[in-house]
Image (tube, rainbow, N blue to C red):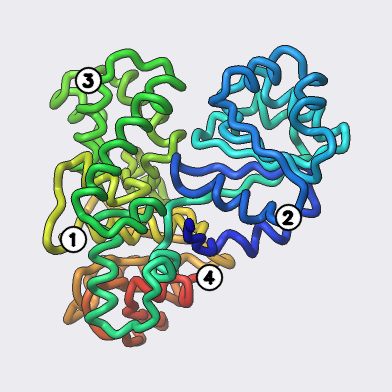
Amino acid sequence: MAIYIERSLKGRFDKVKNNYPVIALVGPRQAGKTTFLREQAKGLKHNYVLFDDPDARNLFETDIKKFEKQYIEGNEITILDEVHYCKEAGRNIKYLADNGNKLWITSSSEIILRKDILSYLVGRVSILKLYPFSLAEFMNAKEQKEIINKIIKRIIWEHATYGGYPKIVLVKEIEIKKMMLKDLYETTLLKDVAQNFSIEDIKSLEEFTRYLSLSIGGLISYREISRNINISFQTIKKYIGALEKNNLIHIALPFFTNKLKEMVKQPKIYFIDTGLRNHISKEFNDDINGKLFENYVAEELVKLGLELKYWRTKSGAEIDFVIEKDKEIIPIEVKLSNPDKIERSMISFIKEYKSKKAFIIFYDGVEKTIKKENCEISFINAVNLKKYLI
């Protein structure tokens, strides 16, 4: 019998499910979207339609009334899986919703969020995102209740090394985990990224994706990428857009209020799942290095619904992440272990933006809070991100 792990998204889902005729669940392939929706549909009369099925897709595209009669009539809920594969998705979903049907739809690509689809669904749809398991969900899946430092380090290492995709988390054998990551990557790259964005040069796309996997946390220079792997600026932009819209990567933009003082052009790129990133980069190590842990913290912050930015000045001062919450500007630094002192960049940022809170997130250390420049600087373990930031 398959094990179901409760997702932290459930609270938000319950708040909106009775207020919208359409709920769109968007997130990476195999993040658990269908499993989640089927669990929520238990006890309700429902139907499940996968648009990988050419017959269902053809009927949806050519005769929506017949599709309604065949698949939807008589159900309290209809789950439409991978709806982005269909033509006229927005128009047809609008028709079904306006005809009194309740639809839960999924998409592994953010193509579903394009204006030509969303424009039909204004006021009718609530969009939710589901990512691979967060650390809290990962610990639930492992039935891990003890949270002493030694156990936390081991749990974070496994989560950061092999990622949070539910099926992979629940497998115990390391070699099978690696095999599943390989299969997932190939399917995502070939079926989602290349197919959805009409990319024919797969070798070039793979080389570019591996380049990004080795550059996590660094500033992305189009000129440098173009020189190193011999692809045009336009192709780089296309590839980044395709990888982002298919939930493989997350882009962190620079934080600034003074354009003259701060660098504003280059983004940083992180992978949504570090396990998938490790497969792409061919790096499965016995310990976590600084760049991998920075990416790991980035993905945990994204799973909390926070918008990531970074700060860097022309003089070289840098903050890993900046978030804005409740009108507060909060700097976040990521360290493998507790630093002996607060770095000059953090102090400069606090002075510049009058921050009242700041965080240093560590892999190994002891939690504590100190006060500097009228700011509470908290040293926290990654396991407690939600407690401090939400």
**Which residue in the protein does label 3 denote?**
203
Identify the mark nearer the N-term, 1 or 4: 1
Q: Mark number for residue 290?
A: 1
Camera-near label (1 vs 3) is 3
Amino acid, disc 1: Gly
In the image, 24: left or right of 301? right
- Could you tell me which secondary element the residue under label 3 belongs to? helix
Q: Amino acid at mark 2?
A: Val
Marks 1 and 2, how far apart in space?
A: 39 Å
- Do tag 1 and tag 3 residues touch (Cβ < 8 Å)? no
Three-letter amino acid code at the position of disc 3: Lys
Residue extending farthest to the right is 99
Q: Is residue 358 visible?
A: no
Q: Secondary structure at mark 2?
A: helix
Q: Which residue is mark 4?
A: 390
Residue marked by disc 2: 16
Q: Secondary structure at mark 1?
A: helix
Of callouts 2 and 4, the N-terminal one: 2
Going from N to C along the chain, the mark reached first, 1 or 2, is 2
List x then y, in percent, for residue 363: 24, 72
Judging depth in this view, the residue of 252 and 329 nearest the camera is: 252
